[in-house]
Image (cartoon, rainbow, N blue to C red):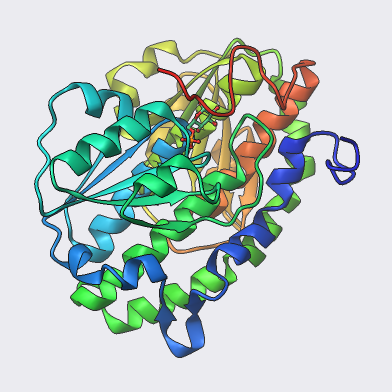
Amino acid sequence: EQIEKGGYDHFMLKEIYEQPSVIKDTYRGRLHANEGIVQMAGVEDNLEKFLNAKRILIVACGTSWHAGLVAEYIFEEFTRIPVEVEYASEFRYRNPIINKDDVVIAISQSGETADTMAAIKLAKENGAFVFGVCNVVGSSISRESHAGAYTHAGPEIGVASTKAFTTQITVLTMIALRLGKAKGTLSNPDFHAYLQELELIPEKVAEALETNDRAKEIAAKFKDAPNCLYLGRGYNFPVALEGALKLKEISYIHAEGYPAAEMKHGPIALIDEQMPVIVIAPKQGHYDKIVSNIQEIKSRSGKIIAVVTKGDTQVRELADYVIEIPETSDALSPLITTIPLQLLSYYIAVMRGCNVDQPRNLAKSVTVE
Ligand code: G6P
């Protein structure tokens, strides 16, 4: 097992560090930025179905559901196709409306999650086209789907999903770019700029991994916190949810992710000098809005840990701790902002003596209801 961990203390850390190379594996042969090409066989073979879709329904569980939420923002922006993201377990039991011109995208690392499987069977029975985004080749969900695209992240052993999440977002972004180009909803310059930027993401993820020591330092300060709040807006709202989930899963600290503006509708009541609030505040996106949210936390003496773009000065003045990440466009930022949050959860869990790779009560794949 020590050999399989490749010199890392845990599979989770190894998998966090694999992200630059596996994201490259995900787009290898599919993305050619200089030629302006982004293609995946499963999408090309079914392009008409995607282009005629009146709606995209995304079904998934856990971290894969968070990747689906990021995809909702990206698909609607790039393709203007309405998207709904559903927990597979809710979808399957609520007599959902499924139309023949719906495209259902099922996201699953393992390809074995029982609820996701049941959701796609229901979608198929109702005549929808089902596209699987799975990591495990030949898995049940990949076989049950009409078509699909693999994430090529390699085996993920740590129960807390890391590289599966970023590679799922990579695949979904590529699909959205392809459709946005075909539909003309994404301008040519934007399309090309995104292709170039996506190709550079592995380097930026590698740079974001340099926050390792900083994450460790911050982890030492907050490892005994009983609660933690994660805030983000827009593309980074799902990242806040995922950051909170990661912390809960492996450190057993109660954590909640919230859209930053919703804070005033409840969570703000929890803020006092004991409460660490992790705010995702990159320069692109709703920066000014997030700055005012940070001010609101500060005026209630919350402890602010902010993920900011390199060179940021405004948030630095307000926050107790900042973690700097490289600059990206708003749409691609989740691939970067999520990295320090993975590291932070990892180190907090290690410092609390938790079993990082096999947290209590959790399974890597949930094949029963
Ligand atoms: C379990 C795992 C999570 C995962 C979820 C969905 O809860 O512990 O890490 O996100 O299942 O799994 P899937 O394989 O369908 O992505």
Q: Is residue 77 left or right of residue 18?
A: left
- Which is more toward the observer, 279 or 39? 39
Q: Residue furthest bottom?
A: 35
- The residue at the point 11 percent across, 54 percent down is 101
- Which is more toward the observer, 77 or 258? 77
- The residue at the point 31 percent across, 24 percent down is 89
Quarter of the N terminus within the rendering = top right
| Residue 339 in view here | yes
Q: Position of residue 66 (x, y in %)?
A: 41, 38
Q: Position of residue 172 (x, y in %)?
A: 40, 57
Q: Position of residue 237 (x, y in %)?
A: 39, 39
- Which is more toward the observer, 299 or 259? 259
Up/down of 95 relative to 210, above or below: above
Q: Position of residue 225 (x, y in %)?
A: 64, 13
| Residue 282 in view here | no
Quarter of the C terminus within the rendering = top left
- Which is more toward the observer, 230 or 276? 230
Label tally:
0
Up/down of 13 relative to 33, above or below: above
The quadrant in which residue 59 appears is top left
Up/down of 236 relative to 176, above or below: above
Q: Is residue 149 left or right of residue 277?
A: left
- The residue at the point 13 percent across, 65 percent down is 52
